[in-house]
Image: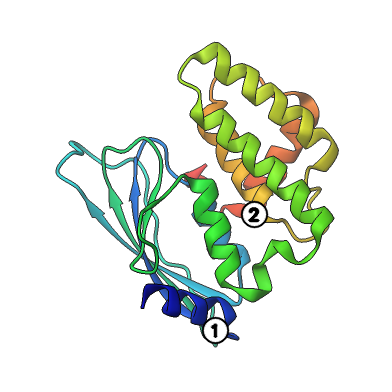
């Protein structure tokens, strides 16, 4: 039954409506949600937030809903701030949770036809490479290894970074979120700093969130 429902959604033409539960570490937030809400103008991403008992004190981030009038695609995100290492995506369409912000973005892009990045093989490979490098940064537990992985990501972004003149992809969203999470107190290369500032301005509605 699960396979049948998933197949129907993946093959279905727009509009779609899907509900997901996201377990999120509030100190490692998936900032890409902000970008999705602002830039996917054919999709309303409705957010409801809850705090798990494993979290003590004030949650340092707020994900509010941002809707676009007259839009039929709906993604309902039930966010649970919880003591987890990375994002956990739970849906009754899959047997096990998806792990990581990157896989959350991949999953959403495949659900909505207009945002499926796998239409073109060459661009899909480029996007997948950036997404995998983001995973590599997030998997490190030693600061020196994190810096090394970030350096490799920066090198790749020097060649493939979004310049603000066309539509950003989920790779840009993932890379921006990764840099935002893991590069605090680190000096960015000048060319990456310019890209990062474009992302901040484009992906975030409220400057106080930056």
- Res 4 quadrant in image: bottom left
Residue at (64, 25) in percent of width and height: 150
- The residue beneath circle 1 is 71
Tell me if residue 70 can be seen.
Answer: yes
- Horizontal and vertical percent position of residue 189: 75, 23
- Compared with 181, 185 (above or below) is above
Q: Is 190 situated left or right of 4 in this image?
A: right
Q: Is 99 situated left or right of 146 in this image?
A: left
Residue at (52, 41) in percent of width and height: 210
Q: Quadrant of the N terminus?
A: bottom left
- Horizontal and vertical percent position of residue 193: 72, 31
Residue 170 numbered tag: 2
Judge by depth and name the residue closer to the eye, 97 or 173: 97
Residue at (53, 60) in percent of width and height: 107
Judge by depth and name the residue closer to the eye, 198 or 192: 192
Q: Element at badge 2?
A: helix
Tell me if residue 205 can be seen.
Answer: no
Cβ–Cβ under 8 Å for marks 2 and 1: no
- Horizontal and vertical percent position of residue 46: 40, 70
Count the labels in the image.
2
- Compared with 77, 133 (above or below) is above
Dot 2 or dot 1: first in sequence order is: 1
**Extreme residue toward the top, this view:** 144
- Horizontal and vertical percent position of residue 187: 65, 19
Q: How is the image coloured?
A: rainbow
Q: Element at badge 1?
A: loop
Judge by depth and name the residue closer to the eye, 1 or 125: 1
Residue at (82, 33) in percent of width and height: 158
């Amino acid at each position: 039954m699960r396979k049948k429902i998933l197949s129907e959604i993946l093959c279905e033409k727009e509009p779609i409506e899907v509900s997901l539960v996201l377990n999120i570490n509030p100190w490692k937030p998936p900032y890409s949600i902000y970008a999705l809400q602002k830039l996917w103008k054919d999709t309303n991403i409705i957010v409801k937030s809850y705090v798990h008992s494993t979290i003590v004190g004030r949650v340092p981030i707020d994900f509010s809903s941002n809707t676009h009038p007259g839009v039929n695609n709906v993604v309902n995100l039930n966010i649970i701030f919880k003591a987890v290492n990375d994002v956990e995506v739970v849906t009754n369409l899959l047997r096990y949770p998806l792990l990581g912000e990157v896989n959350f973005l991949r999953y959403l892009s495949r659900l909505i036809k207009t945002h499926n990045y796998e239409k073109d093989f060459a661009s899909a490979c480029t996007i997948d490479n950036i997404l995998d490098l983001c995973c590599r940064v997030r998997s490190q537990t030693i600061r020196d290894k994190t810096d090394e992985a970030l350096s490799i990501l920066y090198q790749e972004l020097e060649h493939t970074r979004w310049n603000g003149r066309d539509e950003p992809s989920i790779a840009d969203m993932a890379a921006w979120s990764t840099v935002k999470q893991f590069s605090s107190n680190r000096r960015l290369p000048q060319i990456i700093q310019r890209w990062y500032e474009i992302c901040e301005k484009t992906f975030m509605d409220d400057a106080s969130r930056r």
